[in-house]
Image (tube, helix red, strand yellow):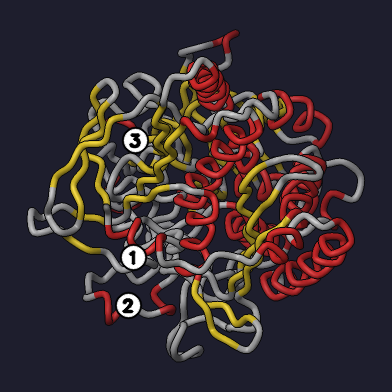
Amino acid sequence: MDNADTAIASAPLPTPKTVRGRTNLPVQAWRFVAINLRMIKIIRKGHA
Amino acid sequence: MARVVILGAGISGHTAALHLRRMLGKEHEVVVVSPNSRWNWIPSNIWVGVGKMTSEQVTFPLAPIYQRKGIEFHQALAVAIHPEGGAGQPGPYVAVSYTDPTRAGQAAELGYDYLINATGPKLNFAATPGLGPDGHTVSVCTPSHAVEAASALEQVIKRLGSGERQTLVVGVGHGTCTCEGAAFEYAFNVEHELREAGVRDLAEVVYITNENELGDFGVGGMTFTQRGFQTTSKMWTESLFRERGVRAIVQAHVSQIKPGLIHYEQLDGSTNTLAFDFAMLLPPFRGADLKAYDALGDDITSTLFAPSGFMKVDADYTAKPFADWRAADWPSTYQNPSYSNVFGVGIAFAPPHQISEPRTSPNGTLVAPSPPRTGMPSGIMGRTVARTIADRVNGSATAPAHTASMAAMGAACVASAGTGVRKGTAAAMTMFPVVPDYQKYPGTGRNTKDTYGEIGLAGHWVKVLLHHLFIYKAKARPGWFLIPE
């Protein structure tokens, strides 16, 4: 087993609730807004 | 009247051209030279590579846009820069060779007052024997490459469907590659397609990379603050690999590809092979094969360009140990130090050093991800240089240059991990700044409030939104300039 595979094997797995949340429409609709706000902040800093 | 010539019509060159046309009066000329007739939104090529988009969806013809905007377009390859003019040409000019089918191979000399080199990368498949579409692997670097990759993937899925085990390898094909993020995206899109096709159980997906550890992405990794803890892009990425059952080989320099077999060396000096049925490996980049000559016709290529072929700009290129590298080494005006009317932007400028620590194996093999300088930073550089030139044309020729250092600019990256309106996922990441500044941000080198990542369907929607938004902007539709780079 490669050293990276050893690290992967001991990496934390998301809980079923977290995995479901990643495709839950109301949760993701909110995250869509939140990600865009974060990106707008970075964009504004880059265009200062 | 001033004449600005822009070499290249990718993200940085096209952005510079459109802004210059907006900022300069009609008496001034904006000229674009590109060997390609079509503009390409490269971040979506990975979706062409899994058959979810056509090449027409990620490209459009440049000529009609330039005609509408009053930009002179030459479909040609820039061959040489003559910054001091030459025999019969008193002013600076660029020698070009047309790729336009109607006058293919014809030569011309295009004079300029200001020159922007935005030629992007030369895809250096030749660096690794057997690498690339002319060898034994596929690529997603261009739309046509991505179409070939999709076709090869379809064949693999058919074989899996008939019960045959297959190994799919995705990654980078040399120790000095960049764009690990694109390889990561393609690996997880392939994995997603295998699951969608119901054949995942018979497929082994392997990611091979020159990164020192997963999550490095050529930017030395990132540290995020989440739920009161500092976590790393390494742990975050390894978690995704475990969840999706993707194997990884890190610290690898791919040295040769034979039919169905990848030869690679790792940082510990070991040499190994990996058998494959399908392999998409990105090539390392070089600068475009541009030469430069002075007024007497003497070769001054090494004055304008680094040995890598990338253009020298206002960076500190002094050789020094990794620990001595500073954020201030990075360029901010992208102006060539020898010729103040020549600029290099996007991938075309020579970075002063890597962002990820370069390492060498006991055999002397360099394993060093090259710094990414695509997407948002490329667009910002193009606009910044356009503003500098516009100030100098409209006002004083000695007007100070505008600045945009990658050590003082952030980046927003969305790495797709599978497509689909309801089932897609992507890792949405922001980092500030792109080049860590350990003097300003001790510890991680970046502002931890602005360095962030999360995985989910929303990230996929953002990537789709960016696809449409940037194609709209590149087509110079009404209000295009209100969309930031």
Q: Earlier in the sequence, mark 2 or mark 1?
A: 2
Q: Measured along the vertical axis of the image, is residue B37 above or below residue B376?
A: above
Spot occupied by residue B478 in the image (x, y as percentages of width and height): 92, 45
Identity of the residue drawn at 46% across and 83% down: B444
Identity of the residue drawn at 51% across and 24% down: B149
Q: Measured along the vertical axis of the image, is residue B153 above or below residue B447?
A: above
Residue picked out by circle 3: B124
Q: Secondary structure at mark 1?
A: loop
- Residue most extreme to the right: B478
- Discs 2, 1 touching: Cβ within 8 Å: yes
Q: Residues within 10 Å of mark 3 (few under 14, many from 20)?
A: some
Asked where in the image residue B56 lies, by quadrant, the reply is top right
Dot label at residue B353: 1
Dot label at residue B325: 2
Q: Chain of mark 1?
A: B
Q: How many labels, in total?
A: 3
Q: Secondary structure at mark 2?
A: loop
Q: Would residue A46 be found to the left or right of residue A27 on screen? A: left
